[in-house]
Image: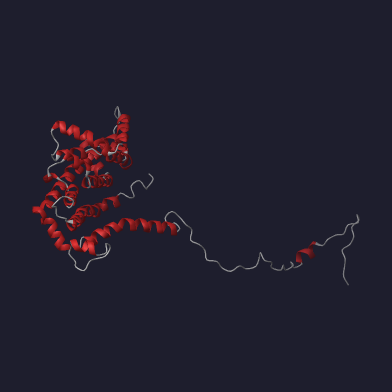
Amino acid sequence: MTSYPPDLADGTTAVSTTDASTRPAPRRRPDATTRATPHRRSRTPRSPLAPRRSVPLTLLTGLVLLYTLLPLAWLVISATKTQTGLQDSFGLWFADDFNLWDNITRTLSYDDGVFLRWLANTLLYVALGAGGSTVLAVLGGYALAKFDFPGRRAVFAVVIGAVAVPGTALAVPTFLMFSSMGLTNTPWAVIVPSLISPFGLYLMWVFAGEAVPTELLEAARIDGSGEVRIFFRIVLPLLMPGTVTVLLFSMVATWNNYFLPLIMLKDPDWYPLTLGLNTWNAQAQTAGGEAVFDLIITGSLLTIVPIVAAFLLLQRYWQSGLAAGSVKE
């Protein structure tokens, strides 16, 4: 027989807590939300160090790489061909005969070895022009970044304005000035304008402000070191990555300089490589001139070899400065 709870005086029914606590909980049927889901592979979280791969960006990078390397590949392949092979064969593939070493020999000995003369002139312009430009940029950039003096803001405005002015706009005034001083058709007409590099000065100014801690300079002055010793023992090693960058920029600009020597020089003995190779190219268009397109291409290949070697030899200084400023002090 089932027993019912007694009625209270007010007519309500008493509920037994003991029965409710000991009563087993009802089993619920699993629905769609509580059913076990299959195990899914967890995705690796993306971060700036491991970005997600982008197919359009990869294709764009490949096109830029192809655009950059295709002319170089054409130059290397064409330098292995003879004058006839340049006209009869496909541009991006080798001809039947491999003529690279003979082309190099003929290029160096053609016209009494004038190519070597042009190479020596170019090395002279780069050593004095680009080297002097780098030295002035390092000294000026360090002084503007770490020394306070009257007129500093005016110097900054002049440097920024000079960076915005293209070099071709200053070519004619520079020629008139050097002509009045009697320096045209001399190496100084190419070297002296190359000493001024507003972009290199601005780059070293910004780099020195970040790479050289002011506290380090103050500590060296307290220890009794002079400014010259501080610069060569402390500052110059810290500025090495920026110095190499400015040096390479100046080297490339001086090595490939064409317009300034064109208006300054008349004597072929002082021509750089850019102007000399253009002279070989122009002689095919003159009456009775000899077409030496195979030598022009081989000479162009020999011209870029020193620049490529300089980049490969100096890249370790860039790698040493990649982490500069990456640690918060």
| 30 in relation to 307, above or below | below
Q: Name the image quarter holding the N terminus.
A: bottom right
Residue 66 figure quarter: bottom left
Left or right of 9, for residue 131: left
Q: Residue at x 43, y 53 (%)?
A: 48
Left or right of 329, for residue 254: left
Q: Residue at x 38, y 56 (%)?
A: 61
**Residue 202 in sight in this render:** yes
Q: Residue at x 21, y 45 (%)?
A: 258
Report x, y in % for residue 214: 31, 37
Report x, y in % for residue 89: 24, 65
Q: Residue at x 14, y 55 (%)?
A: 290
**Residue 224 in sight in this render:** no
Residue 150 figure quarter: top left
Left or right of 62, for residue 129: left
Which residue in the rendered view is the most extreme toward the top?
150
Report x, y in % for residue 272: 16, 47
* Of 191 and 63, the residue lying toward us: 63
Residue 226 figure quarter: top left
Report x, y in % for residue 203: 30, 41
| 277 in relation to 34, above or below | above
* Of 64 and 37, the residue lying toward us: 64
Which residue in the rendered view is the most extreme toward the left?
112
Which residue in the rendered view is the most extreme toward the bottom?
1
